[in-house]
Each structure stands twice: as C-alpha cells, then as structure tokens.
Image: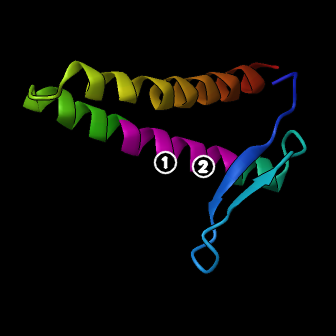
C-alpha cells in the first residue's frame, strides 16, 4: 500500500460512527484494520454466495453487490501487496 489512505476500524456501537485511521505500516492499528477488512470481506462473500445460490436476485440487486465486492477485493489486494513489500 504505497498510497496510505484512511482505513476503517469499524463502527462504534454507542455512537454509530465509523472510525478511520491512517495506520503506520506494520503497526497495531494496521493489524486491527486488516482484521476488520478480512472479517468484512468474509461476511460479504457469504452474503453474495447465498444470494447467488438462491438464484432469485434481480439484475439490479446483483448490480448493487458489485461496488462493495470491488471495495472488499481492492482492500484485500492492498493488504497482500503490503505483505510483499
């Protein structure tokens, strides 16, 4: 991840606000952001898998899944690239 950008640490249940950080490579906050990104990607993959398995989603419903899937994939690819640096 050469271009450091804000990464989500999740949503504060008390306020409903999402917390973002620009984490130092290899630091504690980066590890937290990585864990949250992987957990989110896993949940999203399960939801998309269930929708596809059911086979009853409209084209519009399937299209709505593309942006979050792209974002999750992009973040996971960034994490893998950072591990190789």
The residue pinned by badge 2 equals 35
Q: Circle 1: is it few (<14), some (14-19), or many (20+) Cα within 10 Å? A: few
* Front residue of this view, candidates 57 and 39: 57
Residue furthest toward the bottom? 14
| Residue range (magenta) | 33-44
Most common SS among magenta residues: helix
Per the rendering, the mark at residue 67 is none
**Residue at (68, 29) in percent of width and height:** 79
Inspect the magenta stretch and tell me whether residue 35 lies in it: yes
Q: Circle 2: is it few (<14), some (14-19), or many (20+) Cα within 10 Å? A: few
| Label 1: which secondary element | helix
- Percent coordinates x, y for residue 36 in the rendering: 59, 50
Q: Are marks 2 and 1 in contact (CB under 8 Å)?
A: yes
* Front residue of this view, candidates 53 and 62: 62
Describe residue 45's horizontal placement relative to residue 78 as left or right: left
The residue pinned by badge 1 equals 39
| Label 2: which secondary element | helix
**Residue at (53, 31) in percent of width and height:** 72
């Amino acid at each position: 991840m050469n271009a450091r950008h804000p990464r989500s640490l999740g949503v504060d249940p008390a306020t409903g606000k999402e917390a973002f950080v620009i984490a130092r490579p290899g630091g504690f906050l980066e590890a937290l952001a990585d864990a949250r990104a992987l957990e989110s990607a896993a949940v999203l993959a399960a939801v998309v898998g269930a929708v596809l398995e059911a086979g009853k989603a409209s084209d519009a419903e399937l299209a709505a899944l593309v942006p979050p899937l792209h974002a999750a994939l992009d973040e996971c690819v960034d994490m893998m690239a950072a591990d190789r640096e």
